[in-house]
Image (spheres, grey):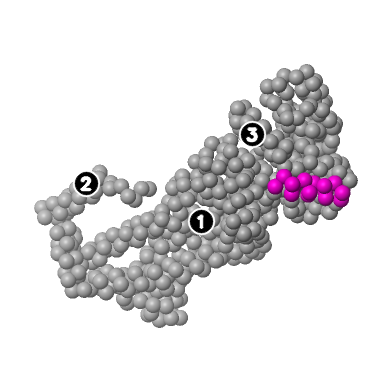
Amino acid sequence: MRADRINIPGIVTLLLVAAAWEASVRTGLVTFEYLPAPSAIAVAFAGIVRSGELLTNTAHTLRSVLIGWVLAGLIGGALGLIFGLSRFARRWFLASLEVLRPLPAIAFLPVALLLFSFSLTTELVVMIYASIWPMFINTMGGVSDVASRLHDVSLTLKLTRMQTLWKVLLPAAAPAIVVGARLCLGTTLVMAIIAEMIGNPHGLGYAVVSALMSIQPEQMFAYVLFIGVLAIALNYCLIVATRRLLPAYGREAANHV
Amino acid sequence: MAGGMADKATQAEAAGGGNIYECDAISLELFPHGQRRLIIDQLSLDVRAGEFLTIVGSSGTGKSTLLRLLGGLMPASSGAIRFRGAAVTGAPSGVVVVFQDYSNALLQWRSVARNVALGIEGKLNRAEIDRRVRQSLQMVGLEKNAKDHPWQLSGGMQQRVQIARALALNPDVMLMDEPFGALDAMTKASLQDEVLQVHARTATSFVFITHDIEEAVYLGDRVVVLAGPPGRIHKIVEIALPRPRDQMRTRQSAEFLNYRAELHAAVLSAGGH
């Protein structure tokens, strides 16, 4: 995926879809009671921008996404490193973790709610639980899949264990770890929205639900579409950051990123 | 540099009676899928200080495994390996292995110079590291590529980077595992001559695995023919060709052709896969 090239056919399609939507709502071709036309959504969007509501809600969601992402990245990365390096850890503890993994994080939400009530803690617990996995799996895979030849090289060049870790294993696993961090960010955002809808009455997720409850479909659609744009923007930021951080990986890393 | 090397070689001779390596009845058993398999069987071999020893054999005769044992990358099941008189447990300092698959053995994210520096970083001061890196790259003719990355170089150049990385350690012994096996004939010939030059200019001993009989004769002071499986010594031939050797003159000489015929027959009668 190239982020720095503007996809003109893609944008044209997008505009055509919006135009078709607008036309079919106006002509009464489709008649859902609460389906607003794109123009009405745009008006509602301008409204929430002007009132400052959007900014407040976005700030809350972004803050929890950032905290959740950093914590999940650190926990998942550390666990991945331990399991990637230690065959012992994999043999004894991986099965237990694999049992936890398919457990849908959303099923955890009532538990967190019971323990931490309606709070940021609830939101973070659910986000982190869901998003440590991509980081964990990618880091573990990246570190344990380092070609056995590089272990031979570290031995024959008499690198210490710490040198092997910092100079060989982590850099070799970096492209996989970065992919893990990107997946982790995506999951964090999804879980933040869900947790705000149910567990913590703040932020963009709660804004969607309250627009729904107060029967303001234009506003609801405006928030939903904005969340989509936010997800794309976050992913794009990470792609740019990756290019800056890992320029030396050349062709190989370009395929990962 | 050459002076320092010569000193090391003399010490080694004093310690081991002229042998830098001594292998005494080494065997290696592995248990793939729970079945016992003998890979190397009671192999005894010495490497003389300063010599260029080449090892040939068909596949399955344990050539690469023998090199891994010498390099301390894996332990033998029984028997003793001594480097400069001391038992080998782990990779001995003064010994470095050069692998056939250069692209896996290089750190693709590091520049050529930083790849060459990998084994000496943190062990020497900045100035000495720079000096050694420059000198090693010069020896393999890559001084202009110091800032490139391995994936920007041809296969032959990447293998030169790996050789330079080994040279930067100032090794007593270079263990080379079919280093030119994946290269074209022209590149192979020029790398053979570069390795011979390193051998002539330093007192480094070489143990060089190949499946190319001509290469073994062209480079070696002695050629070991392995038989197997399980790997064992079939024959050792002293190569009395004069040095410096020359790709045209040496390879066309009657002696060279005789050695080639003798070793060809030996490899055939040794069997293998």
Amino acid type shown at disc 1: Ala
Question: Are dots 3 and 2 in contact, CB under 8 Å?
Answer: no
Which residue in the protein does label 1 denote? A174
Q: Which mark is residue B118?
A: none
Above or below — where is B106 with respect to A226? Answer: above
Q: What's the CA distance linking mark 1 and mark 2?
A: 36 Å
Task: Name the spot of residue A110 as percent of width and height, x first.
Answer: 42, 75
Please tell me whether mark 2 sits on a helix, a strand or a loop: helix
How many C-alpha atoms fall within 10 Å of the one at disc 3: few (<14), some, or many (≥20)? many
Q: Which chain's residue wears label 3?
A: B
Reply above or below: B102 against A115.
Answer: above
Say the numbered circle drawn on residue A12. Answer: 2
Badge nearest the viewer, 1 or 3 = 3
To which chain does the residue with label 2 belong? Answer: A
Tell me which corner region of the image, top left, top right, bottom left or bottom right, holds residue B53: top right
Q: Nearer the viewer, mark 1 or mark 2?
A: 1
The residue that label 3 is drawn on is: B191
Q: Determine whether, in the image, residue B225 is placed left or right of residue A88.
A: right
Question: Which residue type carries mark 3?
Answer: Leu
Up/down of A151 relative to A81, above or below = above
Q: Secondary structure at mark 3?
A: helix
SS under mark 1:
helix
Residue B3 position, x and y percent, is 74, 47
Tags 3 and 2 both on a single chain? no
Question: How far apart, in angstroms, are the residues tagged by discs 1 and 3?
Answer: 33 Å
**Residue B197, how many percent across, how many down?**
69, 36
Residue type at the position of mark 2: Val
Left or right, residue B102 beside residue A40: right
